[in-house]
Image (spheres, rainbow, N blue to C red):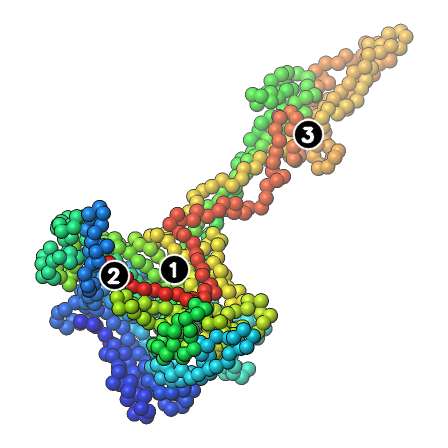
Amino acid sequence: MTASHYTVELKKTVLASLIGLCLSQPCFALEALSDENLSDTTGEGVALLPQDAYMVFRGYGANESKAELFSNRSKDTGYIHYLPTGPLSDTALNRPDGHSVGKADLYLYGLALSKSDGDSNSRLATTEAAAKISSWGTADNPWLLQVGTESNVPTFTPDNGAVKNTETGSVPYFALEAPLYGSSTVTSTRPNPIAIIGTDGKPKKDVYGNVLYQNQKIDPNGPDTSSNWYQVADKVDFLKDIEGADAYNLKLATWADALVLDQSKAESDPNLYLLGQMAGTSDVNRANRLRLQAIWNGFSINGSRIQLFQTLGGATNTGGMSVFSNNTLGASGVLRFNSGDSSNLRAKITTQTTRNQSAWTMIHDGSTVDFDKVTGKSSGASCNNAGGGTPNYSGGCQYQVRKSTTTDTSNTTWSAASPEITNKVLRLSTRETSDTNNIYTPAINGGGAPNFDSSEGIYIYNLNSNLVLGTTYQPLTLGSDGKNFSLEVARIPNKETIYKKIYTDYTGLDKTYLGSTCNVYQCGSSSIAGFQGNSATHSSITIGSTVYDNKLNQITAYNGVEAIGISFGKLVDTSTGDVITGVYTDIQSRFRQAKVIGTWTYSCNLVWSCSTGTVRAWEYKVGAGNPGSYITPPGAANVPSSCTYNCTGTKPSTAQDPANSNRDWNASGALWETASAGALGLVGMTPNISNMPGVKPDVAPNIPSNNFGSAAIDGLLIQHMKITTKGL
């Protein structure tokens, strides 16, 4: 059975509404349109407006409550059965290795269409409010079944050299058209636009991904008055197509079993799906079933259009054309499956960088004369800093040296967990949470729908596929040779009035070339304000993060480290861990030197020949610069009185040595500064602190290994393409 929900509102005002009632399906809601709303169309048509709609294929059984419908996915076993027909060909049967070949039955189960809930492992949301498509289109922008006539369509008759063929004709057509896709080019024209901030603290966006502003026009072509500008309000979603917003956030889901069958067996034979490895054998252990789940969240088919018509004539069997294209059934279409703007779709990269400086370590404390650069230890005579001897005023006694190490550490996290990423995913998966029989399927063996693993499979993020398949002057034709079925997009005729409608001059120099690309941003010209057209001639397919050039209407794949597109398995956040990005050594020194306090004479003889004594003390550098300023701490000895003739006087002794207070480095107030050349030579080290940058991330993010990045095929022209079926 198909579970569905609908409402119907009918007003008997136009013939279209009556026809629509007859054609309506139980899962759709129809609302009649006035003659005024249909006045812009040519021909006859029926407008359809599904409202409060959702559906899911459920298994056979008694009616169930809504609570059961939304909570129990095991009953999603209603199916469509695709059966192969016809015998196998001799080529397929007569394999040189003797291995068996079989066709397959396909069971498509649990087909569900609803509003997206962002869950890539469930076919339907858990509540009706979350599942129902409130309005798939609007009264001004509905689904259309339409018949009409396109005039001035060029025939296939080619140009004759310099003589241009201008033959045209009228082409009646029957078309099915989804609601138009809203324009994504509306911008604010007022200065200093102020973004509308929602309750989540982020700027509000419309369904097309545009940031909305307080001073942005509701109607871009409307008056420049306050009534036509968006205002701040947290409880209102500002959408240009607000009634049809759900149409831009659809969910399509199904699961399927494909079972290889033994065509030598009857349909009721229990060995029908037990085809063995060798032809004519059966094997109960063969894994002859392929099980697949497909769920697509957050997409839209708005802007799609398919039309059928009878082609014009003029083609000959020359120049790649065929008379088969003349006056036959033709088709054209613009098939648009869009997840939305992906120019800002990026993984979030967060870097935390810390800087830690170690405590200062004394590597030479000035207590010895020498410093061994190899061992890093002091050696040599004592400087007598603590008294008990005359100070040594040279060498290492003049310096104290210390060092500190600064370490920068970075931790970079790569994350794709935002709803903008996870809510717009096409997921194909096959692994179940528990094993089931290799050939069981509910349609034959009963049982419920399987439970699929929540993170396995191929994830295709933000897929935008806009395919242009033919036009009335370059149709898609259907044919058969009696055995096989074929689809062919005709070759572009060698006719200027046709190929100039199709080809694009990307330089913009020749305006007579009218071709353009259909992508998520635009799809040809449109006469309806606020909506895109469907007249483009080239196709565009993008996956994941992109870059859009609005001047050329071109899309390229974004190739930065934040790119997201396809992953095998669910993307998970990754981190580099703590990585040291820089280690910097700072070396400082402080300096003292001997200062002569004074001299005196002693031991003089009769000819005035005397010995000279000197009183010294330490003076310490306390001011920056060269030479800087110095002080002499208290503790220097007094200078003895001199004698000059035939006298003994005061001979030098420890009495002239400075007191301990003069020898104390810490009490001196000596200045620590960047190590001098003398200090660096003493300890044999080179600092690199002068090269230390500001704290910054130097570690590339650890991108998940299952992330294969983004892709874009833009400006694709499909022509002279033929697809032919061929049976086994």
Say which of marks 3 and 1 sits in front: 1
Q: Amino acid at mark 2?
A: Gly
Which residue, given by chain and number where applicable, does mark 2 sit on? 727
For the point 26% across and 64% down, the residue is: 254
Rendered image quadrant of residue 20:
bottom left
Residue in the picture at 82% in, 12% down: 611
Q: Which residue is mark 1?
A: 461
In the image, residue 345 above or below residue 512:
above
- Does 606 sit left or right of 470 as displayed? right
Q: For this view, does 219 lie left or right of residue 69?
A: right
In this view of the protein, which residue sits in the foreground, 621 or 325? 325
Residue at (76, 20) in percent of width and height: 615
Marks 2/1: CA distance? 34 Å
Amino acid type, label 1: Tyr
Determine the CA span between mark 2 and mark 3. Answer: 88 Å
Q: Which residue is mark 3?
A: 677
